[in-house]
Image: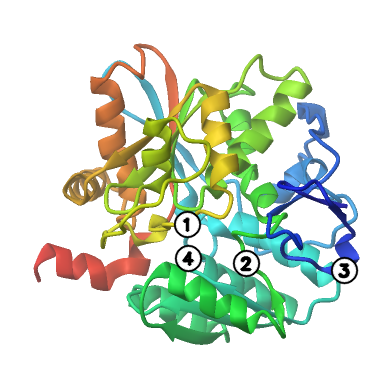
Amino acid sequence: MLVCTSCKKEWGEESRPWRCSCGGPLVVGGGVVPFNRGMIRRNEQGMWRYRAALPAGEVCEPVSMGEGWTPLVREPWPGLNLFFKLDYACPTGSYKDRGMAYLVSRIAGLGVREVVEDSSGNAGASMAAYCARAGIGCRIFVPGYTSAGKCVQIESYGGILERVPGSREDTTRAAERAAETTYYGSHNWSPYFAHGVKTFALEIWEQLGFRAPDALLLPAGQGSLVLGCVLAFEALKAAGEIPALPRIYALQPEGCAPLHSAFVKGMDVPDRIEKRETIAEGISSAEPVRGREVLAAVRKSGGAVLSCSDGAIWQGFLALARRGYFVEPTSAIVFPALRQLSERGLLRTGETVAAILTGSGLKGTDKIVALLGH
């Protein structure tokens, strides 16, 4: 059963809705289901070891390429027990594989044979890969400025690529028009995607010896990492595995920061902003579909929404590369955010902090070459 977050109307999954008739986003009904360490399938190494935490996961036939169980690497940082979660090590080079593996598994079980999706690149590449795996046809809409590496991935997997002139929001509207005749597999609207994403947080908990970090740093455009994080830790808290939610710090580029603006102003919904170009293309979303949920989740955790300049993000990219991490600029926002939080005293001495590195730099080499001035 699916439930509208706005009007609370209930929908049967067999009707394949992608949003409520009132326009509100849908979530999987049933409330928080407790998850404890005894429910882990220890003979499985990928995200499907947490199958019992996924709605209908026990009966869902996985469409999988071994995604998940990515490294959690200790990183020196003054006063902190800092860890980087290397989710760019997922099969298509981004954390989106977690959400997409579960999303495609669920829609394949519902009999969907063709989908349309819109993406800034990573989700589209992941959708194309998992649809190829499942034998589902897909058509991916991307903004015209999308990195060449992501577009090559989509076409290599057999996805039909549609480049849309204009903004990320223009791309969404083009996909929604196409969805009038084809199932809309939007990862932003999907009630399933965040449940797959939440496995990164369950992994961090297990990799830390069944302890939650004190704080997490998460790049945020539409906010699926934030939503997945809260889903995971609420399930662990309900089972008595952790005493409280970790603080969530959602990170946005200054050029496109509707969640940050709303957070600072005390608003419950994303602020209307004038979007500017940013090197953090993967989180350049001016109209977050689930923005109300994301803001509520951050506040519930006791965290905050931060913004960083493109200059700081680029310096973060270089700093991470000098430490051996080759990530796309979107991921690099965690580095200046760490400095900002440390300087403001929001990360306290001795705390355990985890930051997720979301996408591989190999996806954005054309943009990186341009920024390097070569």
Real-space Cα separation, disc 3 to disc 4, in angstroms = 28 Å
Q: Secondary structure at mark 4?
A: helix
- Is residue 32 shown left or right of residue 185? right
Dot 4 and dot 2 residues touching (CB under 8 Å): no
Real-space Cα separation, disc 2 to disc 3, in angstroms = 16 Å
Picture residue at 51% right of the left edge, 66% below the top: 92
Instruction: Specify the amino acid type for callout 1.
Output: Glu
- Is residue 290 shown left or right of residue 46? left
The answer to whether residue 243 is seen in the rendering is yes
Real-space Cα separation, disc 1 to disc 3, in angstroms = 26 Å
Q: Secondary structure at mark 1?
A: loop
- The crowd level at tag 4 (other Cα within 10 Å; few <14, some 14-19, many 20+) is many
User: In this rendering, is residue 278 above or below 176?
Assistant: above
Pinpoint residue 136: horizontal percent, then vertical percent: 72, 81
Residue that numbered label 3 is attached to: 15
Residue 149 image-quadrant placement: bottom left
Query: Which circle's residue, 4 or 2, is located before the other in the chain?
Result: 4
